[in-house]
Amino acid sequence: MVAEISARGEKAALAAVRKAHEIVHAGRGQHRITDLTKTSFEDVRSSYFRLFVPVKSERMRLPTSLPEFSEFRHHAALSDSPVTAAATLGGHWSEHNLAAITHVAACNFRCSYCYVDYRLLAGDHARRTTAGEIVTNFVDIRRRLAEDGQWLSILRVSGGEPLLAPDLITEVHQELDRRGLLDSCMVKVESNLSALPYSYGRLDRNSRAALRDVSPQITLHATLHAKPGERDWPLVRQGLALAVDLGMDVYPAIGGADWTMADMRALFDALQSVARGLVHRLAVRPFNLSYAERHGRRPALKEAAGRPPSLSASAAWEVLLQERTGDFYLARPRHVIGLR
Ligand code: SF4
């Protein structure tokens, strides 16, 4: 009976991926992204992009993997994409503290805490586009910002679920390369990982090879929205293993509100079984977000059973890390930690 329920669950999870995949793929090499001018996101600059400042102290988003911010590692949400950008492109992280975000127009999940309106995750206000158009728009925004003395180096593909369209990620990277921009720009992808095995399986041989080719230059920030044992976990784990196998630079994260110590132990073992460095790269976020879109659909956060109320989720993870590896949580900047 349990096996039957779990087989039914996996089938439903895959059906959700298929449906979202269909929305995102518009045919003839085109993909669907959300037309951001029709949304209520802040700092929308065009149909394609909105701007975002990753490190913002008043929102408690800090690069807490750096020694100077380490004391905040259990209180602030780790935000280290500018640090990774500086390591890749040169300069100080503060010079890379601006990202242009484009949103793929569907997601196979419906997380209760998602900051995106669910209608946008089902293709509402979508527009067809190509990687060439996306990069042209990015370059245009970048030029206008430069005229105002601002530096834009991070092109972030979010959503929705970008890995419903790994071919789009490949093409965006290739477009930047074609225009000679890879020494001053990087591609960051935000994903739930679960769609990658299916999407990858739909690519032809050449597209798979091209994805493998660009993967080491793709920074993949992956939030694990399912726990080991839950319905969506098998797809998330498979997606994680495939991303590592492709050579993507993977930075996993969890929203730590309701993970028990038992969940975390199971996660620790699962991450280590994929790649040993993942446990040192895991970000445990407080998830005390307050986006208007989520009001009314997020269940009240309960103190997770299995750990004392005073122990934050990241502190619980640190206990586990010390027990198993002797290391502190975020002891080093994550990009210096090898995955394998
Ligand atoms: S996976 Fe991300 S985009 Fe999809 S519903 Fe969850 S939080 Fe939202």
Image (tube, rainbow, N blue to C red):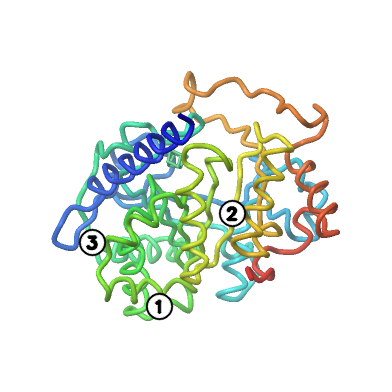
* Picture quadrant where residue 125 is located: top left
Image quadrant for the N terminus?
A: top left
The mark found on residue 213 in the picture is: 1
- Secondary element under disc 2, as helix, strand or loop, is strand
Q: Is residue 123 above or below residue 183?
A: above
Q: Nearer the viewer, mark 1 or mark 3?
A: 1
Residue type indicated by callout 1:
Asp
Q: Is residue 204 above or below residue 180?
A: above
Q: Position of residue 12 (x, y in %)?
A: 35, 36
How far apart are labels 3 and 2 at the CA level? 28 Å
Q: Image check: 136 left or right of 278?
A: left
Q: Image check: 19 left or right of 56?
A: left
Residue type indicated by callout 2:
Pro
Q: Position of residue 32 (x, y in %)?
A: 24, 50
| Residue for point 83% across, 30% down | 310
Q: Is residue 135 above or below residue 318?
A: below
How far apart are labels 1 and 2 at the CA level? 21 Å
Q: Position of residue 112 (x, y in %)?
A: 48, 29
Image quadrant for the C terminus?
A: bottom right
Residue type indicated by callout 3:
Thr
The mark found on residue 265 in the picture is: none
Q: Image check: 145 left or right of 106?
A: right
Whichever of callouts 1 and 3 sits on the residue coming sooner in the sequence is 3
* Picture quadrant where residue 14 is located: top left
The mark found on residue 130 in the picture is: 3
- Secondary element under disc 3, as helix, strand or loop, is loop
Whichever of callouts 3 and 2 sits on the residue coming sooner in the sequence is 3
Q: Which residue is mark 2?
A: 252
